[in-house]
Image (cartoon, rainbow, N blue to C red):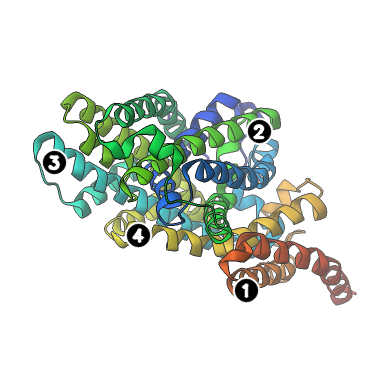
Amino acid sequence: MAVEELGIEPVPAEQRTGTWLDLFAILFAFGVNPLYYVLGGIAVVTFGLPLWWAVGLSVAAQAVGYGILVVVAQVGCDYGIPGQVSLRATLGVWGARVLSSGYRSLAALYFFAVQAIVAATALRALFIALADIHVPIVPVSIGLAAVQALLAIAGFDVLRWVTRVVLPLGIAFVGVILGLYLSTDDPRFAPDRVLDSPGHVVTWAGAAGYLTLMIGSQLTFLPSVADFTRYTRSRAQMRVGMIGGAMLAMIVTTFVGGYAGMAIGSTDTPFKVATTLTDSKPVLAFVVLCLLVLSLAVNIGNAYNLGLSIVNAVPRLGRLAGTALGAVIGIALAGVPDFLTSAADWITRLGTIAAPLATVVLADYLVVQRQRLDVDALYEMHGVYRYTGGVNVAAIVAVVAGVAAYTAVPDSWFKAAVGGGVAAVLYLALVPVQRRALVASVA
């Protein structure tokens, strides 16, 4: 492993050697994080879904989200550029530097902080069960965040190495926790009871609300998804790795987290639930190890994305300084436990912007740009992506309209589809109008 020297400049072609397995490990590690086990519990506890419906809807949400993300991620393996730089083609040079970098920085800060809080909460329960040690949540979450951020500063090689460790460890954890579910004498965990999901029925409002939550959570990743693919050798390798890793992780976290939620009626993580199912110190010590490594992997990725977003906004900082700056803020936010107790609300708010932004970017890349970008112009302040004062007004108006539509309709209308659909259609309608106006202003 070596400290990454590249910032937001393109990765040279000779360094794009990553395979589908690298991306599979990264996306799997990103997906089997402690927070996503909580979301599995939220599916059955908050939205009232039967377990199998929760898994099926999670897969559907992942298919929609990553159906968009893999297209946007192409720019990473095609040109070696990070996601925030590629968004300059859609939003304009200043639009991406200020708006999308600002949005993604907020999203990355939230997910970074909440991952540390989830891990600290579970660690507290595990240490009590192991040695009757009552560790305070806030100092532990801040300490975890500090270690995770420090490793993120080293860059992509560290992320790639850690995620390779997570792949077998994450699978082993699932085997252990399912073994605890099936071997316990607690009747609440009986497979026939949990899989039958008594008292849980599918409602349109519950299904639409959960789909909106999950699709929104995936699409918050859109401005940074190419950060992970710019070291990948081809589109084919990228697609297999991303979709495979993300899908497997979603099935695992929804089933394992949802199983616990169905059994105990709360959204506690399986890491914490394990303390009620066994008093075996070796088993609990293994669960502690899994928790630490899984939370480490996802937060290295969050901090890495955060650093590149900051550098896109202020290029003179460089990646090391940008990541360090974001880390300081993220570590401070790890001391706010409310981020976990209101996780569904926070993620829904972030999704309000994510869905319209994602569909505008997709429409621009596929229809307007025709999947071709002028890489040199992405780094020029007065090139073809300047638009009006550095901002693509049509794109901004479309995103704002999409956010307004998303907010205005009730949850039962499947808000993500409404907001995203309005934004994409309006953008494609505004593009020719804007072009004529720009030509007239030059003439």
Seen as rendered, the residue at the extreme left is 132
Q: Nearer the viewer, residue 374 or 405?
A: 405
Q: Residue at x 57, y 46 (%)?
A: 57
Mark-to-mark CA distance, 4 and 3: 23 Å
x, y (%) of residue 196? 45, 40
Q: Amino acid at mark 3?
A: Ile
Q: Nearer the viewer, residue 304 or 116?
A: 116
Q: Which residue bears the numbered disc 3?
A: 128
Q: Callout 1 environment at 10 Å: few (<14), some (14 to 19), or many (20+)?
A: some
- Say what secondary structure mark 4 lies in: helix
Q: Earlier in the sequence, mark 2 or mark 1?
A: 2
Q: Earlier in the sequence, mark 2 or mark 3?
A: 3
- Say what secondary structure mark 3 lies in: helix
x, y (%) of residue 86? 66, 50
Direction from residue 222 to residue 44 in the image, left or right? left
Direction from residue 7 to residue 168 in the image, left or right? left
The circle drawn on residue 404 is 1
The circle drawn on residue 239 is 2
Q: Amino acid at mark 4?
A: Phe
Q: Earlier in the sequence, mark 4 or mark 3?
A: 3
Seen as rendered, the residue at the extreme right is 443
Please tell me whether mark 1 or mark 3 is closer to you in this view: 3
The circle drawn on residue 339 is 4
Asked whether the residues under the numbered discs 4 and 3 touch, taking CB atoms below 8 Å apart as contact, a structural biologist would say no
Please tell me whether mark 4 or mark 3 is closer to you in this view: 3
Mark-to-mark CA distance, 2 and 3: 43 Å
Mark-to-mark CA distance, 4 and 2: 32 Å
Asked whether the residues under the numbered discs 1 and 3 touch, taking CB atoms below 8 Å apart as contact, a structural biologist would say no
